[in-house]
Image (spheres, helix red, strand yellow):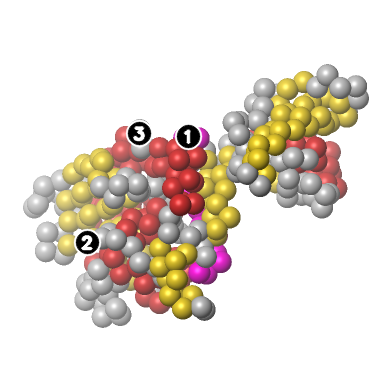
Amino acid sequence: MYEDEAFDKAAREWGTTDNPYDAGYILPDGSLLDMSEGGGEGRTLDHRAVQGILQRDYPRQGAMVEFMSRGAIRMHASPRERALFLDVVRRPTDAQDSTIRRLVPWFEEVRAEITNPDTGYVEVWDHWGDPGGKRLHPRPVIMFLDERGMRGLGARGRADWIIVARDPITGEQVTWETSSHSDARRRAERIRREQWHADTEYGREAVRYQDVRIISKSQGHMLDGLSGFPKVTRSTRKGKKFKVRVCRKIRGEQRCKTIHFGATGYRIKPGTKAGDSYCARSAAQQGADDPFSAAYWSRRMWGCEGKKSVKGKALKVGK
């Protein structure tokens, strides 16, 4: 079961394979997506065939780039040249790294490219081996994909920011990742404006992604619609330890609120049994998911993820 419904659908319709010559993509769990139409005699489907999986119209290679933006790695294995081609948009998962490590030694030539999802063009590429030469070691390929090739490409680097949206056709959650806050805001705005035509229960009509929001992965709280980056500071109000000023637009108007939270006299100890106890008690509390409430920020200070307190997720004063 994949986090993205598109991968589930592709695996159900086309299946997976152990033969790299039949495969067209490496999925996030490291499995190879079979694009041989069951023939087992090499890939017969074009990489752009994923447009049918995504259920919307894309210009040129847009469907292919979108499928890769969600976490798939495009691949092509040539039996004649004994060559492997890889094309990525995001940093490979650990499972994809393992698959690449397994595949590379079987080929005499490897080419890897990193595509910019905003333009659809290759930004960085590298090549290893010579036809007729000895088999390759996977280490330089993995290093290129994980480090050098990702440098300077925000969406392909460390994912500190996540853009979340709801697909208007399937209702499933769709995500994009980036390491830059400014890039996250720019891409979220572009996603909100993007429009395409699709078949709905009411016929062919124009649709857009819905409920587009930005989540800070490193800080662990939602920032959709908030103006600036909220910072927690010491409170001057009697009986309270912390405060945070939050601004966002409500019905087109900018609304700001200073929230004081955290009772004096109590220590915050995330990652402990006391933290787990607090997170369990407050999970169902009103406002636990609302950045305009004290309960929301108290839970962030405790590093609450559901009913568990995670020390690495806890906010700090001034952060």
Of the two numbered discs 2 and 3 in the rendering, the one whose residue sits closer to the viewer: 3
Measuring 52% from the left and 47% from the top, which residue is drawn there? 163
Measuring 32% from the left and 58% from the top, which residue is drawn there? 62
Q: Can residue 226 be seen in this view?
A: yes
Q: In which quarter of the image is residue 256?
A: top right
Q: Foreground residue, 111 or 317?
A: 317
Decide: is 257 above or below 27.
above
Please state which amino acid type lies under the numbered disc 2: Ala
Label 2 belongs to which residue?
77
User: Which sits earlier in the primary sequence, circle 2 or circle 3?
Assistant: 2
Label 1 belongs to which residue?
182
Residue range (magenta): 169-182
User: Which sits earlier in the primary sequence, circle 1 or circle 2?
Assistant: 2
Quadrant of the image for the C terminus?
Answer: top right
Left/right placement of residue 293 relative to residue 176 reads right
State the mark number for residue 151. Answer: 3
Left/right placement of residue 67 relative to residue 165 reads left
What distance separates the C-alpha of mark 3 from that of mark 1? 17 Å
Left/right placement of residue 116 relative to residue 239 reads left
